[in-house]
Image: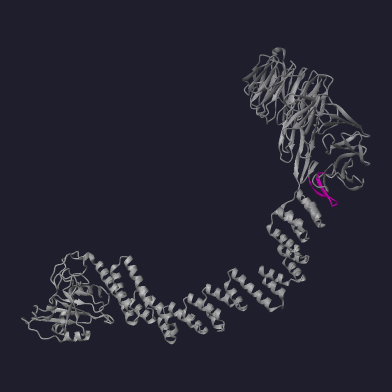
C-alpha cells in the first residue's frame, strides 16, 4: 500500500467503520502510486505507474484523464482551489478545471513528494537528489532548499503545517538520511535536524498541526510533537509503513504498509493533570506543563522536550514524571499568588506507576496494589501493600514529612496513611468499589463516590452512613464550610448543605474542588472555576430559622439581594447579631441605626420583644402589622406617631376611632403641618383653624398675602385673644391694608399701636386727632412728623413740629446734621441757610428757656456769623476786587486787614451786601440809655421838617417783602444834620467808639434813611443809617440781610425767595 487519503466528506473507497471495500476503481493499467482528495471532497485524483492521472468524482466515476512522460509519483490538490499538482519522475503538471490543457514543468531530478501551503499560493516539491523546490501557482521556482546530505539523502516526504495559529508557514521534511527537519517558506531552517534512526516514508500533520505522524522502515507509526519531539508509538506493523494519514478533525489514523495491509487506529489522549486547592497543573502539547491559578486566572508554562506522563501538585511542590525521570519543582516564594517555579530535585530513573502524588518532602508512587514512598533523591523510604487495587489517592494535608493520604480501594475499603508511618489506618469498609473520595475540612465526614455512581457520606468516627445521593461521578467538600459538599453527574451540579434537599443546576464536567463559592470543574481538557452563588442552601437554613448557619453560608458567596434577605429574616427573628453583620455587608446604615438603638434599649433593661418587632415592621414598611404590635404592647401613641409621620392620616383616624379628643386634635395639627410642608397652604390653614392653632393659620395666610382670609379670622376672633389679633394687624400693615390694621387695633384697644400705624403710614391727620384726645401720645406723633418734614425739606414746619413736641434739642440736632452734610458736600449756600435756621432756632430756645438763654444767645451770634461766612464763601468767585471804603470816616482800607471786617481808622464794623459782598453805605448807631425801641421808632417816624435846596425829594416804598429808599431826581441837602456830628471820633484811638444818638438826632432822621433789624427778644434791635440816600438798599424782613435793591430784585425774580434765608416772597413775615 503506497498511499491512502481521507475524504473531507468522510466517504471513502473503504469504509473506515469496518474496513469494508465499497467499490474497486478500474481505470489505470498499472500500479497506483498516489491518491489525493480535493478540499471540498467532491473530487479526488489518482496517479499511476502507467504515467496517467485520473480525476474521479465523489460518486467514484472517472471524468478526466491526462498523462505524463514518466510514472506518476505524487498528486496534491490546492487547499483553496481545484488546482491539481501531479508530479512524475521528470516533470510536474498543474491542472485546473478552468484550463484546457495541463501546464507541465521539467525538473532536474525525480520528484518524490509534494505539498501545498495553507493559502494555496506555493507548492513544495521534494526530490530524490535531496533538494526541496518551492514553486508558485504558475510553476515558477521561488525558493530552493539544498540539504547537506545531497543525493545521498533523498527527500521522501514533506508536509506543510496546517495550523493557522502559526505566524509562518512551516514545512516538515523527512529524508532517507534518517532526519526530520523544519523550514520556513523563505527556506530558513527552524532548529536543528532531528535524528530518526529509520528511513521515513511518510510524514503528515494532524488537522490543527499540533502533532506529526511518521512511518517508515522501522515498521511502526510514531507520534511526534509539532517541534519533532517523539512522544511514542501508535502501532507496530509487520512491514514498512509507506503512508499514514489522520482523519480530518479527529484522532483517527489510517496506516498503509508494504504488504498491502491497511490499519485504522483511534488515538486517545488521556488527561494528565493534578489539583491542589486553587492550583491546577495539566499537560499541554504532550511535553509542556501549564500551572493555572484558578482564582486569579494566572498561568505559567513549563516547557519540556519529553513526553509528560504524570503530574502531581501539592502546596509549593510540583512533580512531573517523564519517560526516564521525575522533575520536582518548587515555588520561588511563599506568596500565595507566586507562579514562578524552579527545579528543586531531579530523580533520573524510569518508574512505572498508575498514580503519582507529591508531598512536601516525598513522592508517592501507586503501582496497582502497592504504594511506595520515595524521598526527593529517589530513595525508597516506605512501602504499603493493599488488599485490592488502588482506585483513588489524595493528599489531605499535614505537617511537612508527616502528611496524610486518603486511599480508596476497589474492594470498597477506605484507608488513611501517614507518609512517616508504615501502618495504614482503615477508616471504613463498604461493599462497592471506590471511584472518588474527599474528606471534610474538620476531618469528621467522608464523602465517597462508588462504582454505582452513588455519593455516600459517612461520619468517620461512628462509621454511620449519614445520607446518600444518586447520579454522582465525583464529589468535593467545601473547604470553608463543614456541612456543604457538591457532586457532579448526569450533566448536573448538585449542592447539598447539611440534611437539606439537594440543589441542582446544569454543569458539564467533573467537580474536583469546592472552595467558598467557587467550584472547580474539569470539562474535557480544561479546568475552570465556576462561581456558584450559595443562595439555595442559605435559604434552606433561613426556612428553619437557623440564622447563624445561614450567615456562614452567605459568607461563602451570595448576591446582595440574598444578603438583604438574610438581614431582614434575622432582624424579624430578633437575631440582632446576625442581622447587624448582614446589614453591615450591604452597608445599610438605616437598619444598622435601628439595631443599635434596640441594643441600647436592651442595655437599659427594656426587653419587650413585641415592641422591638413592631419597630422592625415599621422600618420594613409593614405599617399595619407594626400598629397591631404597638397596640398589643400598650404603646398606641407610637402607632399614632408612625401614621402621622407617614402622613397616613386616614389610617390614623381609623386607628383612633372614637378616642381621646386631645389625640384627634393633635392628629389634625400634624395633618396641617404635613399639608403646609407639601405646599398645600389653604388646606393647612383650614386644618389649623379647626385644631385651634390660630397663630399658624394667620402666619400662613399672611405669608401668602391672603387678606380676605385674615379679615375673616380677625373678625371671628374674640377681642381677648390679643396675640393672634396683633398678628393679624401686623400682616394687614405688611400687606398695605392699614384700614383693616386700624380696625384690628381698635378691637383690641391697642391705641399706642394704632398711633404707630398712623405715623408709619403718614396718616398725620388721624395721628394728630388721636394725640389731641390722648396727649400722652404727643411725642409719638410729633417727633416722627417733624423727622418726616425734615426729610422732605420742610424745615420750618419740622421746627414747629419739634417745638410742638417740646423737642428743641432734636430740632437743633437735625439742623446741625443737615448743616454738617452741606459743608462736607461743599454746598456752602445750603450751609449758610442751615446755619441761619440754627441761629433762629437758638433764638427761639433763648426766648422760652431762661436757663439756656445765655448759651443760646452765644450760639445765635455764632451761627449768624457762620451763615454769613458760608454765604460769602459761596459767592466768593464773584467777588470784585475794590478797596473797602469806610463811610463813617471816609478811609480807604487795605484788602488785607489784620483787624478783620472793621475800619483801620475808626474801628467801625463794615456792613456788607448779602449778594455782592460790597461794603454798604450804612453806619450802625445805638440809642442812648432810656430810649426804648418803640420810642426810637416813633421819633424817627415823626420826621421833623427840613430845608431842602431842591424840590424833588426821596420816596419811601414799603411792601410786605422789603423796605426801600428810592431817589426820584436829585439828592436832598440836609442842613445841620445832628447825626453827622455824631460820626466824629478821636483820631488814632485803638478802641471802637460807637455812634450813640439822642432823641433829637432820632427826630432829625428821615424814615427813609434808617434800616432797622427788629430782632425778637431777648435780642435788641439794630439801627443803621444810610449815608448815601441816592443808592437804594433793601433788607430782608426775615433774616435781616441787606442787599443793593437792584441785586435783590434780580435774585427775587430768579429764585422767588430770599437768597439767604430762602423765604418765599409770597409768605407773610412772621
Q: Residue at x 65, y 29 (%)?
A: 167
Residue situated in front as seen by the camera: 1017 or 461: 1017
Quarter in which the C terminus is drawn: bottom left
Quarter in which the N terminus is drawn: top right
User: Does residue 1004 sit above or below 272 in this rendering?
Assistant: below
Q: Tell me the magenta residue range.
A: 489-506
Q: Is residue 381 left or right of residue 507?
A: right
Residue situated in front as seen by the camera: 984 or 101: 984
Counting from the top left corner in percent of width and height, residue 826 is at 30, 65
Residue situated in front as seen by the camera: 273 or 964: 964
State how the image is colored: one colour
Residue found at the far top of this picture: 152
Q: Residue at x 26, y 77 (%)?
A: 1039
Residue found at the far left of this picture: 949
Q: Is residue 628 left or right of residue 882?
A: right
User: Does residue 461 sit above or below 152 in this rendering?
Assistant: below
Counting from the top left corner in percent of width and height, residue 146 is at 66, 16
User: Does residue 866 sit above or below 107 in this rendering?
Assistant: below
Counting from the top left corner in percent of width and height, residue 584 is at 71, 54
Q: Is residue 910 left or right of residue 356?
A: left
Residue 835, by quadrant, is bottom left
Q: Report whether residue 373 is seen.
A: yes
Counting from the top left corner in percent of width and height, residue 878 is at 21, 65
User: Does residue 98 sit above or below 524 in this rendering?
Assistant: above
Residue 378, by quadrant, is top right
Amino acid at each position: 500500500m503506497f498511499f491512502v487519503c481521507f475524504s473531507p466528506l468522510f466517504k471513502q473507497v473503504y469504509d473506515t467503520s469496518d474496513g469494508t471495500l465499497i467499490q474497486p476503481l478500474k481505470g489505470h493499467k498499472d500500479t497506483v502510486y498516489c491518491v489525493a482528495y480535493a478540499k471540498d471532497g467532491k473530487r479526488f485524483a489518482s496517479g499511476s505507474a502507467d504515467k496517467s492521472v485520473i480525476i474521479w468524482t465523489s460518486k467514484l466515476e472517472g471524468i478526466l484523464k491526462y498523462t505524463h512522460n514518466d510514472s506518476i509519483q505524487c498528486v496534491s490538490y490546492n487547499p483553496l482551489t481545484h488546482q491539481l499538482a501531479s508530479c512524475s519522475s521528470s516533470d510536474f503538471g498543474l491542472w485546473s478545471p478552468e484550463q484546457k490543457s495541463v501546464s507541465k514543468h521539467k525538473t532536474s531530478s525525480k520528484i518524490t513528494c509534494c505539498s501545498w501551503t495553507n493559502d494555496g499560493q506555493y507548492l513544495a516539491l521534494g526530490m530524490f537528489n535531496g533538494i526541496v523546490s518551492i514553486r508558485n501557482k504558475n510553476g515558477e521556482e521561488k525558493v530552493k532548499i539544498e540539504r547537506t546530505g545531497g543525493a545521498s539523502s533523498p527527500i521522501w516526504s514533506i508536509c506543510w503545517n496546517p495550523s493557522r495559529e502559526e505566524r509562518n508557514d512551516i514545512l516538515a521534511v523527512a529524508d532517507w538520511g534518517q532526519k526530520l527537519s523544519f523550514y520556513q517558506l523563505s527556506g530558513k531552517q527552524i532548529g536543528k535536524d532531528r535524528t530518526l534512526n529509520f528511513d521515513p516514508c511518510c510524514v503528515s500533520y494532524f488537522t490543527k498541526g499540533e502533532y506529526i505522524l511518521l512511518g517508515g522502515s522501522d515498521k511502526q507509526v510514531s507520534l511526534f510533537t509539532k517541534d519533532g519531539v517523539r512522544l511514542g508509538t501508535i502501532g507496530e506493523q509487520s512491514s514498512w509503513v509507506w503512508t499514514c494519514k489522520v482523519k480530518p478533525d479527529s484522532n483517527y489514523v489510517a496506516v498503509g504498509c508494504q504488504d498491502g495491509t491497511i490499519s485504522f487506529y483511534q488515538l486517545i489522549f488521556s488527561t494528565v493533570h493534578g489539583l491542589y486547592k486553587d492550583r491546577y497543573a495539566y499537560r499541554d502539547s504532550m511535553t509542556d506543563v501549564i500551572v493555572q491559578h484558578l482564582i486569579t486566572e494566572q498561568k505559567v508554562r513549563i516547557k519540556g522536550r519529553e513526553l509528560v506522563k504524570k503530574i502531581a501538585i501539592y502546596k509549593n511542590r510540583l512533580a512531573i514524571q517523564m519517560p526516564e525521570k521525575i522533575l520536582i519543582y518548587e515555588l520561588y516564594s511563599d506568596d500565595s499568588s507566586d507562579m514562578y517555579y524552579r527545579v528543586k530535585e531531579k530523580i533520573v530513573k524510569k518508574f512505572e506507576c498508575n498514580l503519582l502524588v507529591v508531598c512536601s518532602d516525598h513522592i508517592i508512587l501507586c503501582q496497582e496494589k502497592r504504594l511506595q514512598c520515595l524521598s526527593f533523591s529517589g530513595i525508597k523510604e516506605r512501602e504499603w501493600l493493599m488488599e485490592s487495587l488502588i482506585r483513588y489517592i489524595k493528599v489531605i494535608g499535614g505537617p511537612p514529612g508527616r502528611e496524610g493520604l486518603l486511599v480508596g480501594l476497589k474492594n470498597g475499603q477506605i484507608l488513611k496513611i501517614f507518609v512517616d508511618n508504615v501502618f495504614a489506618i482503615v477508616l471504613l469498609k463498604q461493599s462497592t468499589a471506590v471511584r472518588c473520595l474527599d474528606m471534610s475540612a474538620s476531618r469528621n465526614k467522608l464523602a465517597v463516590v462508588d462504582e454505582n455512581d452513588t455519593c455516600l457520606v459517612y461520619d468517620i468516627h461512628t462509621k454511620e452512613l449519614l445520607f446518600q445521593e444518586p447520579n454522582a461521578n465525583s464529589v468535593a467538600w467545601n473547604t470553608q464550610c463543614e456541612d456543604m459538599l457538591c457532586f457532579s453527574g448526569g450533566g448536573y451540579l448538585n449542592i447539598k448543605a447539611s440534611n437539606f434537599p439537594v440543589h441542582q443546576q446544569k454543569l458539564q464536567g467533573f467537580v474536583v474542588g469546592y472552595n467558598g463559592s467557587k467550584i472547580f470543574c474539569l470539562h474535557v481538557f480544561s479546568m475552570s472555576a465556576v462561581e456558584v452563588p450559595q443562595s439555595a442552601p442559605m435559604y434552606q437554613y433561613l426556612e428553619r430559622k437557623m440564622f447563624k448557619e445561614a450567615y456562614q453560608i452567605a459568607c461563602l458567596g451570595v448576591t446582595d439581594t440574598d444578603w438583604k434577605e438574610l438581614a431582614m429574616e434575622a432582624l424579624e427573628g430578633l437575631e440582632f447579631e446576625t442581622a447587624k453583620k448582614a446589614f453591615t455587608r450591604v452597608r445599610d446604615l438605616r437598619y444598622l441605626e435601628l439595631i443599635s438603638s434596640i441594643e441600647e434599649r436592651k442595655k437599659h433593661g427594656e426587653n419587650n420583644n413585641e415592641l422591638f418587632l413592631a419597630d422592625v415592621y415599621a422600618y420594613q414598611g409593614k405599617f399595619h402589622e407594626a400598629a397591631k404590635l404597638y397596640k398589643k404592647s400598650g404603646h398606641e401613641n407610637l402607632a399614632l406617631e408612625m401614621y402621622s409621620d407617614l402622613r397616613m392620616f386616614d389610617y390614623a383616624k381609623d386607628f383612633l376611632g372614637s378616642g381621646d379628643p386631645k389625640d384627634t386634635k393633635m392628629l389634625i395639627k400634624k395633618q396641617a403641618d404635613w399639608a403646609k410642608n407639601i405646599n398645600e397652604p389653604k388646606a393647612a390653614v383650614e386644618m389649623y383653624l379647626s385644631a385651634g392653632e390660630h397663630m399658624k393659620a394667620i402666619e400662613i395666610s399672611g405669608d401668602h398675602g391672603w387678606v380676605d382670609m385674615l379679615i375673616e379670622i380677625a373678625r371671628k376672633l374674640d377681642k381677648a385673644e390679643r396675640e393672634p389679633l396683633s398678628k393679624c394687624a401686623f400682616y394687614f400693615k405688611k400687606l398695605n391694608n392699614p384700614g383693616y390694621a386700624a380696625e384690628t387695633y381698635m378691637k383690641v384697644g391697642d391705641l399706642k399701636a394704632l398711633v404707630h400705624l398712623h405715623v408709619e403710614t403718614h396718616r398725620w391727620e388721624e395721628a394728630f386727632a388721636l394725640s389731641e384726645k390722648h396727649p400722652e401720645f404727643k411725642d409719638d406723633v410729633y417727633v416722627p412728623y417733624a423727622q418726616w418734614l425734615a426729610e422732605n425739606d420742610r424745615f420750618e414746619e419740622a421746627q414747629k413740629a419739634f417745638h410742638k413736641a417740646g423737642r428743641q434739642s432734636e430740632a437743633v440736632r437735625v439742623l446741625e446734621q443737615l448743616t454738617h452734610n452741606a459743608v462736607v458736600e461743599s454746598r456752602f449756600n445750603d450751609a449758610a441757610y442751615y446755619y441761619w435756621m440754627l441761629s433762629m432756632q437758638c433764638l427761639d430756645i433763648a426766648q422760652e428757656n431762661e436757663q439756656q438763654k445765655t448759651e443760646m444767645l452765644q450760639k445765635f451770634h455764632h451761627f449768624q456769623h457762620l451763615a454769613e461766612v458760608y454765604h460769602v464763601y459761596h459767592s466768593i468767585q464773584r467777588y470784585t476786587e475794590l478797596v473797602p471804603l469806610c463811610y463813617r470816616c471816609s478811609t480807604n482800607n487795605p484788602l488785607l486787614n489784620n483787624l478783620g471786617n472793621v475800619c483801620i481808622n475808626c474801628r467801625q464794623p463794615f456792613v456788607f451786601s448779602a449778594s455782592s459782598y460790597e461794603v454798604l453805605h450804612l453806619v450802625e448807631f445805638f440809642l442812648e440809655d432810656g430810649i426804648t425801641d418803640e420810642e426810637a421808632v416813633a421819633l424817627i417816624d415823626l420826621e421833623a421838617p427840613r430845608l431842602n435846596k431842591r424840590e424833588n425829594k426821596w420816596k419811601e416804598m414799603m411792601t410786605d417783602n422789603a423796605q426801600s429808599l428810592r431817589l426820584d431826581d436829585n439828592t436832598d441837602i440836609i442842613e445841620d444834620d445832628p447825626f453827622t456830628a455824631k460820626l466824629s471820633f478821636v483820631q488814632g484811638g485803638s478802641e471802637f467808639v460807637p455812634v450813640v444818638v439822642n432823641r433829637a438826632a432820632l427826630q432829625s432822621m428821615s424814615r427813609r434813611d434808617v434800616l432797622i433789624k427788629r430782632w425778637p427778644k431777648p435780642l435788641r434791635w439794630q439801627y443803621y443809617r444810610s449815608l448815601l440816600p441816592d443808592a437804594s438798599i433793601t433788607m430782608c424782613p426775615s433774616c435781616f440781610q441787606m442787599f443793593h435793591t437792584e441785586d435783590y430784585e434780580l435774585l427775587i425774580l430768579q429764585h422767588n425767595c430770599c437768597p439767604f434765608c430762602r423765604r418765599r416772597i409770597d409768605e407773610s413775615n412772621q
